[in-house]
Amino acid sequence: MAVALDKAGVDAEHAVFVGDAVWDIRAARRLRVPTIALLSGGIAEPTLTAAGAAAVYDDARDLTVHLDASPIAALFAGR
């Protein structure tokens, strides 16, 4: 994940990671990047939340429907 941030030229403070597994959330937390978890990976919501997901959505479509209230929107709140 650090490589992805570096290649994108973005620091952790200005990033949100989207994943569907506990490992995704743990990797992002090590870098202090909030994670949006998707249930489409087959992991239950309580498990993803317990791992530290900032938000959980059914799938990518559900995230796009709720994008304005997601952690992604929070990145743009202070601009």
Image (cartoon, rainbow, N blue to C red):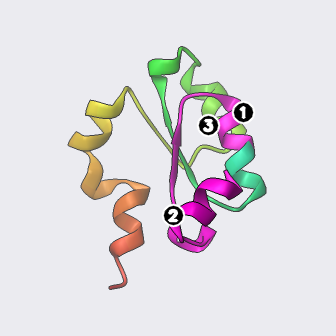
Residue at the location (52% across, 19% down)?
41
Front residue of 4/76: it is 4
Residue 34 x/y as whole percent: 58, 56
Quick one: which residue is furthest to the bottom in this view? 79
Quadrant in the picture for residue 64 = top left
Alpha carbon separation for disc pair 3 and 2: 27 Å
Alpha carbon separation for disc pair 3 and 1: 12 Å
Q: Is residue 25 magenta?
A: yes
25 relative position to 45: left or right = right
Alpha carbon separation for disc pair 1 and 2: 21 Å
Front residue of 1/66: it is 1
Tell me the amino acid under the disc marked 2.
Ala
Quick one: which residue is furthest to the right in this view? 30
Magenta stretch, residue numbers:
1-26
User: Of helix, strand and loop, which one carries label 3?
Assistant: helix
Mark 2, residue position: 8
Quadrant in the picture for residue 33 = bottom right
Mark 3, residue position: 49
Q: Are marks 1 and 2 in contact (CB under 8 Å)?
A: no
User: Mark 3 or mark 1, which is nearer to you?
Assistant: 1
Q: Is residue 20 magenta?
A: yes
Q: Are marks 3 and 2 in contact (CB under 8 Å)?
A: no
Residue 18 x/y as whole percent: 49, 43
Mark sitting earlier along the chain (1/2): 2
Which numbered circle lies on residue 23? 1
User: Mark 1 or mark 2, which is nearer to you?
Assistant: 2
Q: Residues within 10 Å of mark 3 (few under 14, many from 20)?
A: some
Tell me the amino acid under the disc marked 1.
Trp
Residue at the location (62% across, 28% down)?
21
User: Of helix, strand and loop, which one carries label 2?
Assistant: helix
User: Of helix, strand and loop, which one carries label 1?
Assistant: helix
